[in-house]
Image: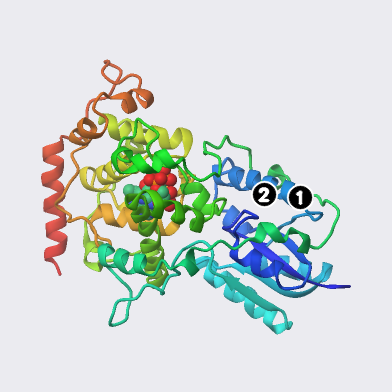
Amino acid sequence: MVPVALFWFRRDLRLHDNAGLCAALRSGLPIVPVFIFDPKILSSLDADDRRVSFIYSALEALQEQLVAAGTTLQVLHDEPLKAFATLCGRYHVAAVYTNEDYEPYARQRDAAVAAELGRQGIAFLSFQDQVLQAPGAVQKEGGGYYQVYTPFYRRWQALLTDACLKPHPSEQLAGAFHREPVGTWPSLAQLGFRKNPVHAVSPCLPAETLLRSYHDTRNLPAIAGTTRLGVHLRFGTVSIRALARQALDTSETFLKELAWREFFMQLLAQEPRLVSESFRKEYDAIDWRQDEEAFGRWCAGTTGYPLVDAGMRELQATGFMHNRVRMVTASFLVKHLLIDWRRGEAHFARLLLDFDLSSNNGNWQWVAGCGCDAAPYFRVFNPQLQAARFDPDGAYVRQWVPEWGTSAYPNPIVDHKKAVARCVAVYKKALARE
Ligand code: FAD
């Protein structure tokens, strides 16, 4: 058997400008492209999970390009260690290339795979691809990671050199794939899933005009004023480098949002405990309410606060919610209803198409006041004022809450003023215990 190298696709489902794939294709070894459906991840998802449908379609699009290059994607459904054992039986594997994934589970998984391959004399080579600055690269002057966003952003931006922005032209090296006839894959049903419509834009760079007006339009949920590229950044169907180059030419406000993504990523990489704990530990003393009815009404979008209800219904129907509305709905759960942010975080994690552990966790903690560089706990969004400011003619609310303004629409679940007073009192009590 001729020696080959495997390229393991994960959060980088594209052939163009892919750092690890580019390095693999330049290695001189024929490259076998691989994707592994990990039962450990799949078993935590609903049968109609939209992310699985999204990934499946992205793999089909990849396969079209790979077949045109004379090869085929090897798709396995197995624990990664076992999948590699299968692949090592099928090929003479000299090396495995991939791109880094910084989530706590991914790091453990990769360490185990690298160790097992190492025992067999097979190199495991991992490249920076999904971020402009890898977690740990943006350090404070005296060392240590940034806990405040603005100085992080300044340093992050100073480190945006040509070297980290330059494309990796993997798409020009398609001749280096291992030539192979088209193979078969497990169907969605064999994986245990049903197809669910995916509401996503195509994986193209945003229009220049959108980014130029982004600063003024990004807070208005009724209009298409943001890029909706979250899911493509999550699964790597767009290149972060191409997006950042475009942002540098058009909109610093947009560049700052890309930096928030990396701020939360470095934070979780440094502090994996945040998956279950508050960044500021004293906030874990808050006496959260156990109110199943209120939680159910928040999830269903029947709180009687139109902007909150519109957001929750949009999330349920499409897997997307506008950033401004995410802030308002999250704040409402935590502060008006005094329900633990972890419950809201888990609900978003189940439904968001662009779900990303570090961004979701970081933003929930930010809203709850317990996070890194978070909003002070006594600053409570007023959902009515937010609606008046960001959806002044009610177009967004009417789209998702057609019965708004009729007798069919529920009365508010809580009184705003009383809820704010209760929230401040409960937070104060918890923080006074320290
Ligand atoms: P755009 O405005 O076009 O921004 C471009 C990209 O910048 C986004 O796709 C995203 O990658 C990044 N970005 C923008 N805002 C933020 C932010 N506040 N934090 C981190 N990255 C940001 N974003 C996720 O990607 N996954 C999540 O699971 C997630 N959960 C969230 C939960 C809450 C409670 C809140 C308040 C925000 C959350 N966000 C999350 C951040 C933000 O709402 C989404 O990134 C954004 O709405 C996605 O839409 P877009 O692609 O049109 O964004």
Please name the residue that numbered disc 2 is placed on.
59
Amino acid at circle 2: Leu
Residue occupied by mark 1: 185
Question: Quick check: can you spot residue 343?
Answer: no
Q: Amino acid at mark 1?
A: Trp
Visible in this render: residue 125?
Answer: yes
Seen at 55% across and 40% down, the residue is: 202
Rendered location of residue 174, percent (x, y): 74, 58
Instruction: Indicate which disc residue 227 carries.
Output: none
Quick one: SS at disc 2? helix
Q: Residue at x 58, y 40 (%)?
A: 48
Vertical side of 225 occupied by 331: above or below: below
Q: How is the image coloured?
A: rainbow
Q: In the image, which is nearer the foreground, mark 1 or mark 2?
A: 2
Residue 306 at what x, y percent from top left? 27, 29
- Helix, strand or loop at mark 1: loop
Which one is in front, 94 or 184?
94
